Image (cartoon, grey):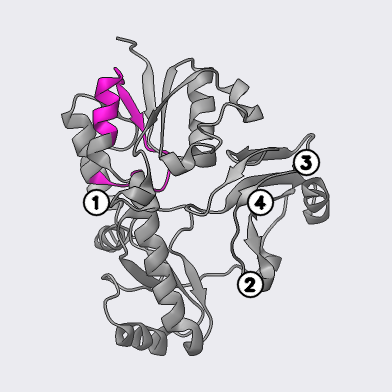
Amino acid sequence: MDKRKVLVANRGEISVRVLRAAHELPMTTVSVYAEEDRFAGHRESKNPMNHRFGPVYVVILFPSLQTSDVSSSEAYLQGARIVSIARSNGVNLIHPGYGFFSENAEFAATVREAGIEFIGPPTDVLRKMGDKVSARQIACACNVPVIPGLDAPLQHLEVAYSFIARHGYPVVIKASFGGGGHGMRVVHEDDSLEGLIAAARSEALGAFGNGEIFIENTVGLAQDRITQHGCAIQCRISTEVPTEGFRSDSGIVDVCRHPTGNGVRLDHGNCFQGAHVNPFYDPLLVKCTTRGTDLVAAQKKAL
């Protein structure tokens, strides 16, 4: 058995980043995908980034989401199936990326019980800290200052209004589990509160398999109190239709040109000429991070 064989339990640019790092170590890698993701960057051999992380064994999770009871978001949340693939392919490490299973204590426990190493915190730490509400409670018990927020998952709209009456706007809705900004919405007024709560729940459920959310106050820093040494910005380029409420778009990428040079970082799994963008997943194509001596310099590098 290859003692350094890792399965990446994720998709898209997240998988590409982990695969690239594993290749540099070097390690043998296994990538999983759903049929509808067969042209995604972590699977598609035409992706020009693939030469940077070498050969990858690819294993399908489900033949077709359209003919099964598993939704697109659920495909990458099938823990038992992922562990089974890992065992049958001689994998001894599983990297969850971020989102999906990255903060799921039960999945980590299942992986470890199967004799496979889970690349992440100990299971008991995930149980305590993977849930942001539980993490807040632990911080409070240790007398660590925390931002004003709910001490339990939000169940009723009235609780949100009561919190806002005491602490005011703006507030931020957060997914109790997971990360990466999924399930997060900033609210500035009563009129948008209910709709943004529903949107945050839906996004959290799709991304993490759990729709629990809670509310915190937002915190801002006065700009004149910040000493600035250089500037970095991140742009997330997605396929959306601005004239139709920024709904997700799909199709084939005909032309793709990337900024390059010093101070430019590109994280992408599906942004290259000929890439297939399907309607089943996050429309993110690439994250472009640039840095410069100031904001203007960083912005110019992103263009």
Mark 2 highlights which residue? 244
Residue at image position (66%, 52%) is 237
- Rendered location of residue 75, percent (x, y): 35, 45
Where, by quadrant of the figure, is residue 102 drawn?
A: top left
Give the label on residue 257, or none.
3
Answer left or right for 274 relative to 140. right
Identify the image quadrant of the N terminus.
Answer: top left
Mark 1 highlights which residue? 128
Alpha-carbon distance for marks 3 and 2? 25 Å
- Of labels 4 and 2, earlier in sequence is 4
Q: Is residue 160 above or below residue 44?
A: below
Mark 4 highlights which residue? 234
Q: Amino acid under label 1?
A: Lys
Q: Is residue 19 above or below residue 5?
A: below
- Of labels 1 and 2, earlier in sequence is 1
Confirm whether the magenta stretch covers residue 86.
yes
Confirm whether the magenta stretch covers residue 237.
no
Q: Is residue 166 above or below residue 136?
A: below
Mark 4, other Cα within 10 Å: few <14 / some 14–19 / many ≥20: some
Q: Secondary structure at mark 4?
A: strand
Alpha-carbon distance for marks 4 and 2? 24 Å
Q: Nearer the viewer, mark 4 or mark 2?
A: 2
**Magenta highlight range:** 82-105
Q: Amino acid under label 3?
A: Arg
Q: Secondary structure at mark 2?
A: helix
Q: Nearer the viewer, mark 3 or mark 2?
A: 2
Residue at image position (48%, 41%) is 37
Residue 109 visible? The answer is yes
